[in-house]
Amino acid sequence: MGFLLVGACAAIEASVVATFGEEGAESGIVLAIWAVASLAGGLGFGNIPIGPWALARRMTFVFVGAALAMFAFDFWTISGALVISGLGIAPALAVMFSIVSASVKFSDTAEAYGWVGTGQLVGAALGSAAAGFLIDGYGSVGGFIAAAGIALLGVLVPVVFRRAHPDLRGRDASPLADTEPVALPPS
């Protein structure tokens, strides 16, 4: 899922730069607005319990914002679309990290997060590459199409695999213990 989320984000970044260019400040300001929206999403939605539908719901924000950006061609409309998208980014990452934390033994967390990071890096590379090809063919809207397509997969995958998603509502998301106390017979 990190692969899909970060792939969609990389495609959005490429699309924003393709829309506004690299000379002016617009690209940086739009991306900063997007980042602040992600922060706001994390702060605002971070306390929502993580159930089987949590990741799909949060990825829906990313998808809807990316899809709306396909039809937005100026500073304010693209910024508005990316605010919607950004509201789902930090909460989706929080769900993914919570799932990893609650699903592996403490001694395996470093490796698990290493694989999560690797998936995200591959997603960034492939998302920006897909956006680049579509931007070359269709302009900046092509990159937003790539982002929306990748984000749609990011909604569908957790829907299909929702039964494998741990229900962390009311549960500690700490890593599983490698060892536990052993009860000794009374002396």
Image (cartoon, rainbow, N blue to C red):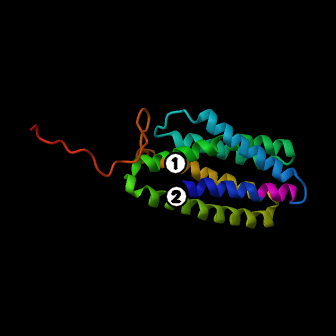
Q: Provide residue 163's location: percent of width, then percent of height.
A: 41, 45
Between discs 1 and 2, the one toward the N terminus? 1
Taking the image as shown, residue 17 lies to the left or right of residue 95, namely right
**Residue sitting farthest toward the front:** 187
Residue nearest the observer in this picture, 50 or 56: 50
Magenta stretch prevailing secondary structure:
helix
* Residue shown at 83% from the left, 53% from the top: 27
Magenta-span inclusion, residue 16: yes
What's the amino acid at mark 1? Met
Q: From the image, tell me which residue sits under label 2.
A: 116
Number of marks in picture = 2
Q: Are marks 1 and 2 in contact (CB under 8 Å)?
A: yes
Which amino acid type corresponds to the residue marked 2 in the rendered image?
Val
The percent coordinates of residue 153 (x first, y second) are 58, 53
Q: Which residues are magenta?
A: 15-21
Please check the rendered image and state whether residue 137 is part of the magenta-colored stretch, yes or no: no
Q: Is residue 68 visible?
A: no
Image quarter of residue 185: top left
Q: From the viewer's perspective, is 20 left or right of 33?
A: right
Q: Secondary structure at mark 1?
A: helix
The residue tagged with tag 2: helix, strand or loop? helix
Q: Which residue is mark 1?
A: 96
Q: Position of residue 149 (x, y in %)?
A: 65, 54
Quarter assignment of residue 145: bottom right
* Disc 1/disc 2 C-alpha distance (Å): 9 Å
- 186 or 88, nearer to the observer: 186
